[in-house]
Image (cartoon, helix red, strand yellow):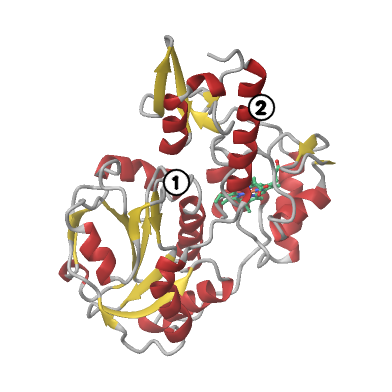
Amino acid sequence: MAKWLTLLGVLALFTLGFLASLKLRPPAALEKAEALAHAEKKTLAPLFPAPAFAFPDQHGVTVTGPSLTGKVWVANFIFTTCRTVCPLLTAKLVQLQRALPGVDVRFVSFSVDPEHDTPAVLAAYAQKWAPDETRWQLLATDAKTLPAVAAGFHVTAEPNKPGELDPILHSSVFVLVDGAGMVRGVFDSEHREDLKALQNAVRTLTNAPAPPAPQGAPVGVELYHALSCATCHEAPELAPALLGRAGSRVTFDNGLVTTFDADYVKESLLAPDARRARGYPLHMPAYDHLSGEALLVLTKYLLETPAEPTPTSDVPVEVDPVCHMKVRATADALAHTHQGHRYVFCSRHCLERFAATPGVFLPDGG
Ligand code: HEC
């Protein structure tokens, strides 16, 4: 019997590992917004009016459509506990913010998790990703009006199918709105050309001058923070730590190993999905737009900087007994107590599987 249970556990692990390794593609339900992204983005012709809403931002100030009148703004849809697409989306939004310094534009992130994402939670999230950004408003939505607002933007925000890693399914587009509240373009965050087009479109609508030529040589530590490397890689539940690893062994999803050296860092930046580090559902964004010089400087920084105690080291990181992913064991982590021990989970899905049959997931059968 115990043998069969072990076998079942191993099988479950393989299935989960496989699910996690699939790149999370938006399913058919999301095509509406994505279709718009491809058909209309170049003309900037008015598409449809942005829907009405009134939600508090991370400072508790109510933001409405009319309160944004006269401003060009970029909307997107995220939730703070999401571990698959949102950190990628937010990394891209922060890159866009940094590519548009001094431009009079607003960035409005609608939370699609009204239950969890309060203004205080959103404030902490903004602080983590872009502490100096004053143009970014993160909205704490409510369950009653969120569906109408999502529909008004032609995007999806709904509970995910059981079995998916993240509990909420939502569109990964950026929506560009002009000062009169008209949507002028929908941009697919998964396409680099779309992100470039969005940057240009913001400059066009705000009459901002062309970007200044980069000044001075890039500095490693600055790139590491400005490109959001630190935000993901200093959160052990999102991505592996990078500093202090020169010359060490790296094990991949498929069990092969390599050495953490300049070639490997370069490959990770240019073609991150070629070989994936073990245990992370999130995909590392490609940085293939960096100049050769920036690549060299960043690589040198990673290989020559010793490991630092991460700012999050006071929170223990534990392993989800179901999928074996790393999870921060904070007070509000998804947890379940079994025989006096508190287990933490990456997702509601893992928690529910564990709660149903804890013995399957514990080495000694519980
Ligand atoms: C949105 C989060 C995110 C951002 C931003 C990010 N990464 Fe990553 N990175 C990941 C994840 C997740 C992995 C592990 C999965 C994989 O290998 O794709 C990873 C893997 C890596 C690896 C391989 C590490 C290993 O243990 O095998 C390197 C090197 C790396 N990233 C460098 C960088 C650098 C440099 C930057 C900034 C220019 C950066 N990353 C920005 C999420 C991110």
Q: Position of residue 271 (x, y in %)?
A: 72, 59
Q: Tell me: is circle 1 under 8 Å from ligand 1.
A: no
Determine if residue 240 is in view.
Answer: no
Relative to the observer, which residue lies in front, 189 or 93? 189
The kind of residue on which mark 2 rests is Leu
Q: Residue at x 66, y 58 (%)?
A: 218
Q: Residues within 10 Å of mark 2 (few under 14, many from 20)?
A: few
Is residue 284 positioned above or below 329 on the image? below
Question: Disc 2 versus disc 1: distance between alpha carbons?
Answer: 26 Å
Q: Are marks 2 and 1 in contact (CB under 8 Å)?
A: no
Q: Position of residue 57 (x, y in %)?
A: 24, 52
Q: Is residue 180 left or right of residue 209?
A: left
Q: Which mark is residue 245?
A: none
Q: Residue at x 58, y 47 (%)?
A: 19
Is residue 219 positioned above or below 362 on the image? below
Most distant residue in the front direction: 1
Residue identifier under label 2: 7
Is residue 219 positioned above or below 83 on the image? below
Q: Label 1's element?
A: loop
Is residue 271 positioned above or below 48 on the image? above
Q: Label 2's element?
A: helix
Residue identifier under label 1: 166
The kind of residue on which mark 1 rests is Asp
Mark 2 vs 1, N-terminal side: 2
Relative to the observer, which residue lies in front, 179 or 30? 30
Q: Residue at x 41, y 50 (%)?
A: 161
Q: Determine the image quadrant of residue 335.
A: top left
Q: Position of residue 310 (x, y in %)?
A: 56, 31
Q: Position of residue 200 (x, y in %)?
A: 48, 79
Determine if residue 154 is in view.
Answer: yes
